[in-house]
Image (cartoon, rainbow, N blue to C red):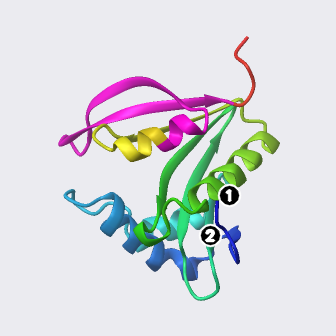
Amino acid sequence: MRTTGLSIRLATTDDAADIAAMSRDEIERGLPWSWTEGRVAQSIRNPDTNVAVAGERGGIAGFGIMVYRDETAHLSLFCVKASHRRQGVGSAILVWLEDVARTAGARSIRLECRRDNAAARDFYGEHGYHERAIARGYYQGREDAVQLEKFLVPPS
C-alpha cells in the first residue's frame, strides 16, 4: 500500500469545486450531475457531516462525505481519482471516516454503490461491509444500487 506524502484533512469550501468535478466525472458519469459545487459546499458547512479529502500537496486524490445520524452513519459519496486507485488512498480515507464515526457513537455505517460497480463492491467487501439489498432504480430511476453496511458495534 503506497500512501507516501498522503494527508487526510477536513475539506474547506475551497475544495468544493474539485470534489464536485470528481463526482461528475468519476461517480455520476452517465447520470445528470447532482453533487454540484453548491451541494458539496453545503455538506462541508453541515455540522452533522464530515467531508474528508486526501491528497498530496497541490491536489485532491480522493474524498469521502459522511453524514452522522443517531447510531448510523451514512457514507453519501466516496471517490478516489482513477490515477490514484490501488495505492491505499481509498482505504486511508475510509479508515479515517470509520474512526470518526466510532468516536461519534455510530454503531454502523451504511452506503450505496452502483450495482454494476464490481470494483467498489469488492473494495467495500474487503473492508468488512456486507451487501444488504438491491435498490432498483436508486440512481435517478436509471440504475440499481447495492446497499451495504458495516457494523462498528456488533448488533444486539
Quadrant containing the C terminus is top right
Crowding around mark 1 (Cα neighbors within 10 Å: few <14, some 14 to 19, many 20+) is few
Asked which secondary structure carries label 1, the reply is loop
Give the spatial CA distance, label 2 vs label 1: 20 Å
Q: Which residue is mark 2?
A: 54
Q: Residue at x 52, y 65 (%)?
A: 42
Q: Residue furthest front?
A: 1
Describe residue 93's horizontal placement relative to residue 137 as left or right: right
Q: Which residue is mark 1?
A: 47
Q: Which picture quadrant has residue 5?
A: bottom right
Asked which secondary structure carries label 2, the reply is strand
> How many numbered dots are placed on residues in this image?
2
Q: Give x and y (percent) for residue 1.
A: 64, 59
Determine if residue 112 is in view: no
Describe residue 76's horizontal placement relative to residue 23 as left or right: right
Q: Residue at x 72, y 44 (%)?
A: 101
Which span is picked out in magenta?
A: 123-151
Q: Which is in the foreground here, disc 2 or disc 1?
A: 2
Q: Residue at x 50, y 69 (%)?
A: 84
Q: Which picture quadrant has residue 114?
A: top left
Q: Is residue 64 above or below residue 123?
A: below
Q: Main secondary structure of the magenta part?
A: strand
Along the viewing direction, whichever of 149 and 127 lies nearer the viewer: 127
Identity, as a three-letter code, of the amino acid under mark 2: Ala
Q: Give x and y (percent) for residue 147.
A: 43, 31
